[in-house]
Amino acid sequence: MWVADLDAKKAGNVRERAKIVLTEAARAAAPSFIQALRAKDSDSKLSLIGLARKQGMAFGFRTADERRGEAVAKFVRFNVGAIPVVTNLFDDPALAGMAINLLFGSRLASADPLIRALDHTNASVRMQAALGLDALYVNCVRFNNYKLLQAPGWSGNFPTNAAVAAIVKLLKEESPDTRGAAAYALGDMREQPESVIPALTECLAVTNESEVRQALAVALGKYGRRAIAAVSALKQLMDDSDPAVRTAAEHALKRIGARERG
């Protein structure tokens, strides 16, 4: 009932009341939910469950992974109400990555929390947040799976300008995984070429890790003709020692339309 009241067609006060009720319910359910997330099985318990199931005598035993899956399936039903609980998990290294994945279940409502997570002190959280925004953009904007409203600086109700600006900053991260995730996200979004293309090119010039160079080349290629300024940098990758990087650069140049000119 309350989730149905979140529908954009409902009156504003109805939606706000639904958010409050769902948030209160999520907070009440949080202790048992978090306990399920932290659950672990001993080797002996897993062996016992496996043996019992082989003999058709499971006795209702469930593994920690199964209990965790059930808990997540139930908790995401709180929709936007789950967001305050989930974002509080960012500071727990053991649960931070899972928290980012859970946010995606809230769809567009998770965009702002994911953008804030890009400034988190945990590099893993920042990387996962970039990937989460990437997936959210692809589903909600590129494939237009949800009804979108138009507003300045937004693609539908996805805060494009804020997301792109925050992800661009990750290109200066020390972690190659984070820089690679940022590159792929920016390539998938293909927004703000006037600021993104120079940032990707600058990152390419100072990047030593082949997997990140590959990600940057792929991202630039996805901008097509709008990445014409990056042609010189991409051509330099044609002599890269890594064949995957050379292939990515070649494909990028073709998408930009510069490969045939040599």
Image (cartoon, rainbow, N blue to C red):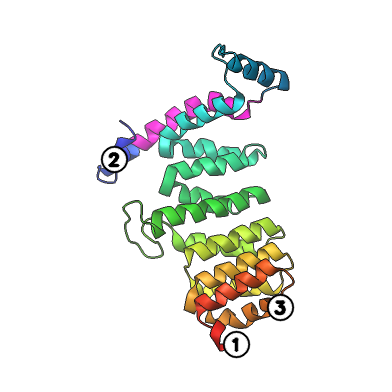
With 104 as the anchor, is 218 left or right in this view?
A: right
- Image location (x, y in percent) of residue 5: 29, 37
Query: Circle 2: is it few (<14), some (14-19), or many (20+) Cα within 10 Å?
Result: few
Q: Where does label 2 land, which residue?
A: 13
Relative image position of residue 157 (x, y in whole percent): 37, 55
Determine whether the residue tagged by mark 1 lies in a helix, strand or loop: loop
Residue type at mark 2 is Asn
Tell whether position 144 is magenta. Answer: no
The residue segment tinted magenta is 18-40
If the image is split into quadrants, where does the C terminus sit?
Answer: bottom right
Q: Amino acid at mark 1?
A: Gly
Most foreground residue, 33 or 214: 214
Q: Can you tell which mark lies on residue 262? A: 1
Separation (CA) of disc 1 from disc 2? 61 Å
Can you tell which quarter of the image residue 160 is in?
bottom left
Q: Which residue is mark 3?
A: 239
Which residue is rendered at x = 45% and y = 56% of the image? 137
Q: Residue at x 71, y 57 (%)?
A: 175
Precedes in sequence: disc 1 or disc 3: 3
The numbered mark, 1 or 2, whose residue comes first in the sequence reads: 2
Magenta stretch: includes residue 32: yes
- Whole-percent x, y for residue 259 in the image: 56, 82
Mark 3 and mark 2: Cα distance apart in space: 61 Å
Distance between mark 1 and mark 3 Cα atoms? 13 Å
The N terminus: image quadrant? top left
Depth-wise, is mark 1 or mark 2 nearer the camera?
Answer: 1
The mark lying in front, picked from 3 and 2, is 3
